[in-house]
Image (spheres, coloured by chain):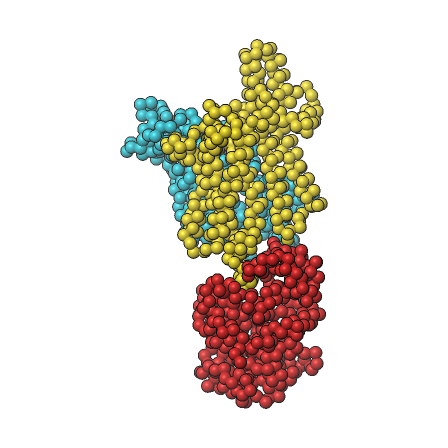
Chain colours: A red, B cyan, C yellow
Amino acid sequence: MTSLLSVKDLAVEFDLDKGALRAVNGASLDVQQGEIMAIVGESGSGKTTLAFSIFNLVPPPGKIVSGEIFFDGKEVLSLNPEELRKYRWKEVAMVFQAAQNVMNPVARIADQMLDTAQAHGKTSKGEVIEHASELLKMVRLEPSQVLHSYPHELSGGMRQRVIIALGLLLDPRMLILDEPTTALDVVTQAYILDILTDIRDKLGLTMILLTHDMSIVAKVADRVGVMYAGRIMEVGKVEEIFYDARHPYTVGLIRAAPSLIGDIADKKAIPGSPPDLLNPPAGCPFHPRCAYATSHCAEVVPELKDTGGERLVACHNWQLISGGKQSG
Amino acid sequence: MTATTFSAEIRHFLYRSIYEPFRIVTRDKKAFAGLIILLIFLLMATIGPEIVPLDMRSNFAERFKPPSREHPLGTDYGGRDVLAMIVHGSRDVLSVAFLAALFTSLIAVTIGMIAGLEGGIVDVALSLAINAVLSIPSFPVMLILGSVFKVTNALTFGIVLSIWSWGSLARAVRSQVLSLKEREFIEAARTLGLGTFHVVFRELLPNVMPYVAINFVDTMRGAIGSSVGLMFLGLVPFSATNWGMMLNFAVRQAGAIYLPYAMSYVLSPMIAIMLLELGGVFFAHGLDELLNPRLRT
Amino acid sequence: MLVILKRIGIALFTIFVIVSLTFFLVRKTPGDVMQAWAMDLVQTYSMTYEDALSMVQSWYSYDPHQPLLQQYITYISGLLRGDLGKSFIYKVSVNEVLVRALPWTAFVVSISLFLSFGIGILLGMAMAWKRKSFLDPLVTAYASFTGATPDYITALILLIIFAVNLHIFPLKGAYDATITPGLTWPFIKSVLMHAALPIAAYTFEHAASWALAMKGSAVGVLGEDYIMAARARGLKEGRIMIHYMGRNAILPLVTGLAISLGGMVGGSALIETIFSYPGIGWFFAEALTKRDFGLMQGLFLFLAASIIFANLLADILYSVLDPRIKLEG
């Protein structure tokens, strides 16, 4: 079965005064229709840049320097501006973080919805508002209250839900969610997650979930991709990853994640600090922090390989790690 | 506080407020260009009149002559050399502007400081005053003042020009003082028993001076524009070589703009004013860019 | 609501300050000026000197026999009734002068404001949208130049080039005196030709700084997340430029409109004198040079009051345009 989204060897560089920063450095990923794929990684791992690349919207001074992105067979990076504009939001939409200022401050919510719809050829105002109202109800907001408001008049949680509704407005085939629960309180977080599972169940939408919070992954995702230093290090089904991680970084992430059960003393932070993306280490980018690293790791970059059962791992020593004891 | 400590205070204050900004400015190209232009005019104003003789006697045979070797900028309606008048006029123009800026700064700093430090009802009253001065356009006020009061020399002219110009600087000084007041080092100084004098000169004024320095050049520029405007309307007739008066005579009284060969007479004061203003703009621009006080301390 | 009232209160207070200041300034009027006027009247109308002097004093609302406070109250109550005083040289009330002069100034100033603001923001948007065009250095250099040159010098240059030498535009007046006013094309054309240079002077002077201000604001807006998000939503570039960048970038500039108006009105005395354009500025300058304190005071009061209210309006306008602002004290 062909993937809905197929990212091949993507590389994105930011041209800074100090040098070229490789935010994404040879990342490859496949997402199947109807699944929820979580991409986990620390801040700076390149998840958001990867997401923007799918829209071909990497902000300057960033530039996509190599790689291909196939969405439903079409190569996105070679679309002309008009095709690109039509593709954006209609095929793939994004749910930004509520904390970001992603809505026009001087336009009401209803107008933002209308703007989006009209840009894609839907001119009937009544129909658009009706559809928007249904979506707002689906995210458990009251349309009559929200549609007339300005963005700053809504709370963080309400804004996040509006952004979700806005993302669903054109019935996209795929939805990318960038840290949808960060900067929200725990109760609202649970609420949003509920809504997301609702959406998945009702609409059968393909979703990519960017997060650094492993607990969300456990609750909502089907598959997980682990990203580090701009590369995908491991991909696999959620339970398999949690119970049988095959990459040292994944192991570290799971061990470091807090949970309500278990002693906090069992939690271990990953030693070392995030890599310098201006001068990445030679060989495997994780090797300076890796307990299993060998001299081979410091020289040769590991490829993302299928290690059986559609489990992809980019590590020379994955056999050492697999089957090891984990704590969830 | 003894006499010696006081002079040490003043010296320290002068260093921080004059020497330091000067050094920073010479690093920026635009500001440097502006500085050079200003220095040329300064030279013109100080030693120019000693070098170039001014002969104010009328010589009607020579009137409205175009530029020649004898009269590089032509002659005026009375046959007098325009270049000499420009050179002598620069002294008037610059001294009036300087005095205006000086008085403006003094008034603004005093009012801003008192408002900021005292707070309470004094601050409210002074803020209302600052607001009033800012909302009423200063040029018409200066026009009226120039008409009502007899302005006979550069000093009185400078005072008249400064009466309505201190608003924006006072506001800036006040907010700076207000924000500094909260900072620990003021508290520390007070706790250590160092008097208000010390606080004002050692702590507050040096932090306020960057605003004053930038504003000084701008105020001078504004004063030049306003003073020439006032003279152009014939309201302040105390000096015949002042560029504003030259323009007045040229345009309004002698009708020189209608005489093509008298162009240099009309254009000379205009170009002098433009150059001086441009120099001021560049210089202040550089000062502003480099000397952003918010990045300090 | 409460805050708007507070603003209005401050505005009224400021006007009160001006009124009082001008009142006391006029009291300060050199006595010899009044005597000179009195002498003039004696010669023209063969009055007695005492009669002439008291007439002049009444023009100034200055009755030396009345206590100062009384005079002040008389003056204020006159003002409240709309009596702005009398002009000595024209022998009519200031209001009559205003009626004749205000339309011209209003005409020129409003068109100039509109043109310079309009051209400025369009240029500014273009400069911000396409960063590396030739516009940027050109406009910036032009702005430095015009910013440094005082407005009357720009006016003089325009007068010399276009009116005196090239004879394209007329040298003075609001319209050709040989044409009778009316809604006829010859009249309208004449009005426009006469107003063209003053308008050009104001516009040349200010357009570039509006452009730079708009550019600065727009560049700031372009860095915001909602611009990026708008692109992600597939909105057309034109829509983003105007409704997302433009609408947001203009906001901080609105208060500048009042300041610009203030500057134009303040400078009108000089500009109108240079073009011999009979607006408020021209009459004000005449009053100044001829020491007509009655007209001077009345016109100044009117000017200052209008500018203060313009500022107030701009503040209110801003709060209406930007939904995020709830007017703060």
Residue at image location 54% in from the left, 70% down from the top = A51
Residue C321 visible in the picture? yes
> Which quarter of the rendering shows the C terminus of chain B?
bottom right
Question: Residue A34's x, y, as percent?
Answer: 59, 76
Question: Residue B178's x, y, as percent?
Answer: 63, 50
Q: Looking at the image, which is closer to me, C229 or A175? A: A175
Asked if residue C203 lies left or right of residue A136, the reply is: left
Residue C31 lies, with reference to residue A114, above or below; the image says above
Residue C273 visible in the picture? no
Residue B246 lies, with reference to residue C253, above or below; the image says above
Residue at image location 50% in from the left, 41% down from the top = C115
Count of numbered circles in the view: 0
To which quarter of the image does residue C197 belong?
A: top left
Residue C105 lies, with reference to residue A118, above or below; the image says above
Residue at image location 54% in from the left, 75% down from the top = A4
Question: Residue B183's x, y, as percent?
Answer: 62, 56
To which quarter of the image does residue B108 belong?
A: top right
Residue furthest to the left:
B69
Q: Looking at the image, which is closer to me, B96 or C82? A: C82
Residue at image location 55% in from the left, 21% down from the top = C89
Question: Residue A224's x, y, as percent?
Answer: 58, 79
Residue B190 lies, with reference to residue C160, above or below; the image says below
Q: Looking at the image, which is closer to me, A70 or A226? A: A70
